[in-house]
Image: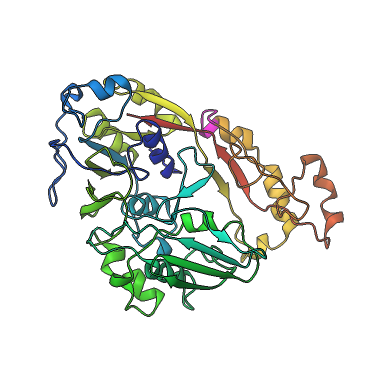
């Protein structure tokens, strides 16, 4: 299945039981087949035999309370390119590292806001907005037992500020003039100008261990380190990666010393395969959950033992024109091409109607205010003939063709 915004699948898991990275906890003797170094066992188990934390069969499930233990096997169509957040931008990598890393802040279950994770509270902001002070919890540990301190936060942000930084998140901390550990569990950000988005940006920069990567002097060294590229990754998140067999599967095991509640599921396995491979695994009962593309809905509906849920998601698809190619140098050419394409036909023909036209690169589920200075000004098709007259003006128009992926088809 085509998984354009795989991270939303994790949000779905949160909604079905608060199972993953926003949670933490220990196993209550649940037996799984995802032991370190072994291929996951795909034999079906009777969910009615799972015991809750009080040892009473089915009581928690009956009352809607989460049940601890067990295993979930997830179909994934892509493999991570890396596990150090600053070095990657693809969805598969973020999904993989989000299970093992923790950040100062995290998204709420609804996905519209951030809340403290490793931080104690939101930043204390100076009157002029040029200084933001964040207090850290003193009970957060990396999976190797080392405590998370302000030095780790300073080191993490410092990766994005390295001279040779070649990642895609160059704008996250562009207003950060300096970051320092002003106490063992206190970080002070000095800003070049006020930045209300700092907490949201810190959510996108999970904390990596200074004691593992701190001796590396360049971004290139960090990108190539085994803690960035193998199951030797160390993080402060709810799971530890126990085995990564390239091209086949990734195993995770819940940490019993995680600083938040949960996680309730003891073992998670990503089974890696393309769309056809995942459908075959689904039919064989070898995976518990996958995302299904619109064209595969009929197929999965015919498979017994699974539920199919259709839910809104935040992702969008787009065509971006290569402005290094002289054919696309003119903004008016790009605008004309965009307006000439029938996006409704794409939604109907390719997505079977499961989408909507996007006018700017954000989900329509989120409310935004478009200011006069916004680079995304909406141009109607009837204005196409007047574009030439606008040449040389300061008006900036979005140069991409965007279609919202309206629904995520979740099979579980």
The answer to whether residue 31 is above or below residue 260 is: above
Q: Main secondary structure of the magenta part?
A: loop
Q: Front-most of 136 and 8?
A: 136
Q: Which residue is drawn at 30% across and 23% down?
A: 306
Q: Front-most of 66 and 137?
A: 137
Count the marks: how many? 0
Colour scheme shown: rainbow
The answer to whether residue 37 is above or below residue 269 is: below
**What x and y, as percent, mark residue 19?**
32, 37
Q: Does the stretch in magenta take in 89?
A: no
Q: In this view, does 49 lie to the left or right of 356?
A: left
The answer to whether residue 255 is above or below residue 152 is: above
Q: Front-most of 384 and 113?
A: 113
Asked where in the image residue 279 lies, by quadrant, the reply is top left
Q: Which residue is drawn at 37% across and 49% down?
A: 95
**What x and y, as percent, mark residue 323?**
63, 63
**What x and y, as percent, mark residue 390?**
84, 56
Q: Residue at x 58, y 56 (%)?
A: 197
Asked where in the image residue 45 lies, by quadrant, the reply is top left
- Residue 348: in sight, yes or no? yes
- Residue 277: in sight, yes or no? no
Q: Quadrant of the C terminus?
A: top left
Q: Front-most of 365 and 260?
A: 260
Farthest-out residue, right: 389
Q: In this view, does 152 lie to the left or right of 173?
A: left
Q: In which quarter of the image is the N terminus?
A: top left
Q: Does the stretch in magenta take in 353?
A: yes
Boundaries of the magenta span: 349-354
């Amino acid at each position: 299945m085509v998984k354009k915004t795989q991270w939303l699948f994790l949000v779905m898991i949160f909604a079905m039981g608060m199972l993953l990275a926003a949670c933490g906890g220990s196993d209550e003797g649940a037996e799984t087949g995802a032991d370190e170094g072994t291929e996951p066992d795909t034999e079906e188990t009777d969910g009615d035999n799972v015991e809750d934390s009080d040892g009473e069969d089915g009581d928690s499930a009956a009352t809607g309370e989460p049940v601890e233990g067990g295993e979930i096997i997830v179909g994934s169509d892509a493999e991570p390119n890396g596990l150090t957040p600053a070095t990657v931008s693809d969805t598969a990598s973020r999904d993989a590292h989000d299970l093992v890393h923790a950040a100062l802040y995290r998204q709420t279950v609804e996905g519209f806001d951030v809340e403290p994770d490793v931080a104690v509270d939101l930043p204390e902001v100076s009157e002029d907005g040029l200084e933001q002070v964040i207090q850290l919890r003193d009970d957060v540990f990396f999976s190797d037992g080392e405590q998370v301190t302000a030095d780790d936060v300073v080191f993490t942000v410092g990766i994005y500020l390295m001279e040779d930084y070649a990642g895609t998140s160059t704008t996250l901390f562009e207003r950060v003039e300096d970051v320092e550990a002003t106490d063992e569990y206190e970080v002070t950000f000095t800003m070049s100008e006020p930045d209300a988005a700092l907490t949201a940006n810190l959510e996108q920069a999970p904390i990596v261990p200074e004691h593992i990567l701190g001796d590396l002097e360049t971004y290139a060294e960090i990108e190539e380190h085994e803690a960035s590229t193998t199951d030797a990754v160390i993080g402060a998140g709810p799971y530890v990666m126990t085995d990564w067999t390239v091209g086949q599967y990734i195993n995770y095991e819940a940490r019993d010393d995680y600083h938040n509640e949960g996680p309730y599921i003891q073992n998670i396995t990503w089974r890696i395969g393309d769309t056809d491979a995942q459908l075959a695994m689904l039919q064989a009962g070898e995976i518990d959950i996958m995302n299904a593309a619109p064209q595969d809905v009929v197929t999965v509906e015919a498979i017994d033992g699974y539920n199919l849920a259709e839910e809104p998601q935040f992702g969008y698809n787009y065509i971006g024109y290569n402005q290094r190619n002289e054919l696309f140098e003119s903004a008016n050419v790009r605008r004309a091409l965009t307006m000439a394409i029938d996006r409704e036909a794409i939604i109907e023909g390719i997505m079977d109607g499961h989408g909507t036209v996007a006018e700017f690169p954000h989900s329509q589920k989120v409310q935004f205010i478009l200011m006069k200075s916004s680079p995304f000004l909406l141009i109607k098709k009837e204005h196409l003939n007047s574009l030439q007259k606008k040449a040389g003006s300061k008006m900036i128009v979005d140069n991409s063709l965007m279609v919202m992926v309206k629904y995520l088809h979740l099979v579980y």
